[in-house]
Image (cartoon, rainbow, N blue to C red):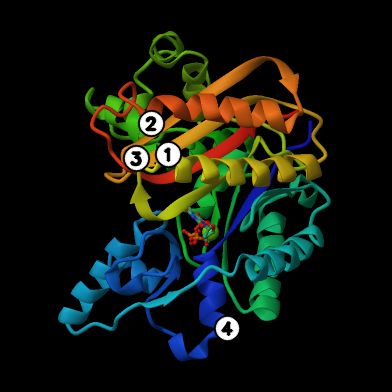
Amino acid sequence: MIMRIIAHLDMDAFFAAIEERDNPQFKGLPIVVGADPKGGRGRGIVSTANYKAREYGIRSALPISKAWLFSEEAARKGKPRAAFLPVDFDKYSRVSEEIMAIIHGYSSVVEEASIDEAYLDLSLAGSYERAKEVCEKIKKEIKEKERITASIGIGPNKLIAKIASDSQKPDGLTIIGSDDETTCRELVERFLEPLSIRKIPGIGPKTEARFHALEIKTVKDLKKFSRKQLEEMLGKWGIELYEKVRGRDESPLQEVWIPKSIGEQETFEKDTLNADFIFSRLKVICQNVFRRFSESGFQSFRTVTLTVRFADFQTFTRSQTLSAPTNTAQIFQFEAMKLIMPFLDRRQNPRNKPFRLLGVRVEKLE
Ligand code: TTP
Ligand code: MG
């Protein structure tokens, strides 16, 4: 059997790096890409921030008003204020396509995992040394053609490649593996053991907190559990986790990207409890989502999911899975309406909190 060598490439501070490239007046400064901060009263969130801005505590998904505060705080200490720039998604998509084209030039098996990341199968390179050379060329070509940097991880599977690419950002190239199978296994386990359990994809803040309560902090700590114990705690995902903490992952590259859901959300200009307004926005969001579903090539969906965020950021999602797949706009909108009703009265909103954000998506696409 041929040895698997997988690489994972992830662009560094992607949206912000493109803006920094295209706006030389901001070069070297902290840059935040996201919603309009409106002098601290802006209501959206940060898409991403460059590494300078991250030193101020600014990162993806932070409320833009907080990012503004952090920047002001830095200014009080004599540091430069951050530059706030709007999201130009079309531009980043174009750059993404160019980067993917470069990557496809080096491997015939590529999974485009998101706008700024891809997995490449480099097994045909035949050795880690050759795989490393290929990745050096990819990094060089991206730097020359796009004038932004990527970080790459190389390992025996997607799991290790992904964690490795994140381990020396920005502009990193991290190899965790060996042409010798036994050595490779050892290197992988030694690489994972000291890491925080949060580095394992799939472990989010909730699972992390659960394990922290049991004094489990590192991947090595997690290895104390038997497969059965993890299954009892987490179900099927526990069995997967048992394999992952040992660096084992056989998942194949998904060369054709299949979306799991199609959705849209909207942050209101002002928090509101006006039912007419909320219904009218829900209708518009449903129409947009349905149009995208119709254009997607999918034939049907079975689950409708609603997200409500209240003014205090408390966020709820509610899903309805239909007894049979459907493809009609009426059923979609009707289900979304049913899901939102409890949030407009005592059942889910006893203290009459106003809405901040509304989102709808369809899932179980076929
Ligand atoms: P990431 O690769 O997660 O982040 P990044 O490229 O900005 O930074 P890093 O160097 O740590 O990889 O996401 C890629 C892009 O996706 C990012 O530039 C902006 C966008 N994005 C959002 O819009 N919202 C989010 O919450 C996240 C995580 C990313
Ligand atoms: Mg990135």
Which residue type does callout 1 highlight? Ala
Q: CA distance from mark 2 to mark 3?
A: 41 Å
Q: Earlier in the sequence, mark 1 or mark 3?
A: 3
Q: Which residue is mark 4?
A: 22
Q: Which residue is mark 2?
A: 344
Does residue 177 show up?
A: no
Quadrant where the N terminus sits is top right
Q: Which mark is residue 275?
A: 1
Mark 3 element type = loop
Which residue type does callout 3 highlight? Ser
Does residue 280 show up?
A: yes
Mark nearest the camera among 4 and 1 is 1
Left or right of 180? Residue 86 is: left
Q: Residue at x 33, y 21 (%)?
A: 347
Spot the residue most to the front.
Answer: 276
Disc 2, ligand 1: is the CB inside 8 Å?
no
Q: Residues within 10 Å of mark 3 (few under 14, many from 20)?
A: some
Q: Earlier in the sequence, mark 1 or mark 2?
A: 1
Quadrant where the C terminus sits is top right
